[in-house]
Amino acid sequence: MTTPAAIHAALRGDNALPLRPASQVMDLERLGAMHQSRLSFMRTLIRKIMRERWQISPALFELDNDGYGTVVYEIQAPHGLFSFVLFSDYLAPEERNDRVIATKWDLTMALVDGKVDADYVEQLRQNVPKQEAGRVDARVFVLSRANRSARNFDYVVDQLASGKQPDVDRIAQVGYLYRTTAVYGSGKLGMADWEKVQSRWPDFARPFAAEMFVCLMLRNFSLLQAEHIARHRSPDTFVEMEPEIKRYFGIGNSTGLGMAPYLVNHPLLINQWVEMRELALARVRVLGSVDSRVQQQLQALIERSATHTRQIITEDEWQTQNNVQVLKDLDALHQQAGQPLENWDALIQWSEEHCSLQGQELLVSILLELYPELVNDLEDYCSAEEFLDLDPLMTVSTLKAVIENRYDWALNLDFGESGAREIFWYRSEEKMEPRLGNALEEDGKEKQMALGVGYAVRKCYDQLSEYVAEHPDHSTARFMVARPKLRGIVRRIQSMNRCLYGDIQANLLHRDVLPMHLLRAKLAFFGVSKFDPRSKLWVRNTMFQGAPLLEDIGKTFNDDWFMPLAPQSSTKQSAE
């Protein structure tokens, strides 16, 4: 398989197109305009499962007529056997809470290495339903919980019990039966850490593969449980849900500020994710042939994306206007794509001149759909060791030049203007979630999280410039002795100088910063769709909508669930 380094060399030749510059790609607003793509983690996980034909079946199924009890699935993957253990408990309405600080949930679950016996299941039963208040051992590598959709779950059960299919129009309002409120991994609560997962369990060695798999299993169980309850409620009239409608159900997710710091604190990993996506686009631009068949596919995908966008339900005015603009962009792109095209550069350039950022980035995702043979293998290069290394021998003059070249965006920010340092990020002890504080009105700035990378670079540069004026030939090591508090940002600067992307080019301390862009960027890498912001600080979305069902494993699979559509052509669109 061709390595990314070899691909870089080929694409960076005199006659090759360059990758898009970091100044364009890492702009915060553009990151917040990203959409799911072939390289999103849900898509790559499904391809892996379907290609390798994982065997997934219930090993223990102890649910009462109301759907409460214990279920254990065994997963036979190419490199190991795993167990997905799920506990379903009654949850009183007054105890229902989707916040991180909740203490009870409808479902709790764990992904475990190996086969589980009755004793181990009982051990999990004593801890998994407690989530943060419990403890598990290193056989467990993902822990999660979920609550029923108040609008959909009982309705779907009632419909199936009475011999009817759920109304697709109603499903489109809320495209899931359950929503997750947290998915934990990477060593939390006693679980196996990422290093162990990556080295010991190759089946889940890609970033967030295990977490995405748990959400996929939750989606499968939600459908199974609804049918189980309906069947026992009215065995004479019960009907199973039609497969097309089943596939239209995903898993709901609510994501808040807890996800935002990740993009800042893992720059090498984010660099890798972005670089592979940009590399895929560059491959398409250089190697993607254009003919009438491909142009027809392009127009069909644009039409699908428009229909999908019209089916998004949101009460948020900002997101509504974004969706309206995307529809205008797609209509214009559809007309432009009908013109003769020799290559994709002209269409990409046209979109950058005539479309919004969301329209531009949606075109990128659509173009990647056209060429799986140019894109799919890059999914194997989305990992990175998050280690920021200090180069003590680099001269301070060289370090100053690195900042001027690599971090020109930070040096161009005016941190003296009104509002430039008004926001600080901190972790609430009471709510166990990141929060935004106002530096002018609230105490606690001394406990802020280190997310103001641009400001840290600016401070480092100012002190470094004074030092270089006196000691231009000194090493970074000597500068660190003189300015030890700058060690962290210097380590980041030197390490990121070896990357193409990674640093978000924005002042995250500005009073007008929109954290939604951070949330959306990470969720797009995950592969979610149908963003429904509830404020500028948290967003609802849908996972795995349109994805194959577990019973589809082993059948023909064409990986065609990009921008999933309601299964009935007669379904009214949300815009009507």
Image (spheres, rainbow, N blue to C red):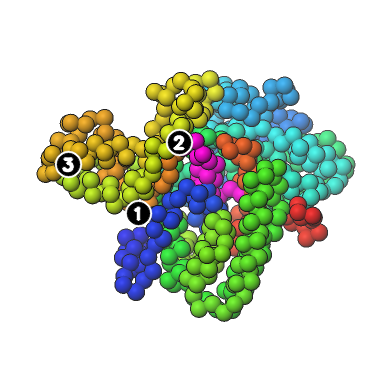
Q: Nearer the viewer, residue 375 or 227?
A: 375
Q: Nearer the viewer, mark 1 or mark 2?
A: 2
Check the image and report above or below for 451 versus 166: above
| Residues shaded magenta | 509-529
Q: Is 225 on the left-hand or right-hand side of 433?
A: right
Amino acid type, callout 1? Leu
Q: Are marks 1 and 2 in contact (CB under 8 Å)?
A: no
Check the image and report above or below for 79 versus 256: below
Amino acid type, callout 2? Ser
Q: Nearer the viewer, residue 540 or 240?
A: 540
Give the residue number, with chain letter if any, for mark 1.
Answer: 500
Q: Residue at x 47, y 26 (%)?
A: 440
Amino acid type, callout 3? Val
Displayed quadrant of residue 253: top right
Can you give x and y, in whole percent of width and height, for residue 428 in the image?
50, 24
For label 2, the crowd category at 10 Å Cα-Cα, with few meaning under 14, some 14 to 19 and many 20 or more, is few
Q: Residue at x 21, y 31 (%)?
A: 483
Is there any visible trace of residue 291 in the rendered image? yes
Task: Report helix, strand or loop for mark 3.
Answer: helix
Disc 3 and disc 1: Cα gap in Å?
26 Å
Give the residue number, with chain letter if any, for mark 3.
Answer: 468
Give the residue number, with chain letter if any, for mark 2.
Answer: 418
Q: Residue at x 45, y 62 (%)?
A: 280
Disc 2 and disc 3: Cα gap in Å?
30 Å
Disc 1 and disc 2: Cα gap in Å?
32 Å
Q: Residue at x 49, y 75 (%)?
A: 343
Instruction: Give whichever of discs 2 and 3 has the lower sequence position.
Output: 2
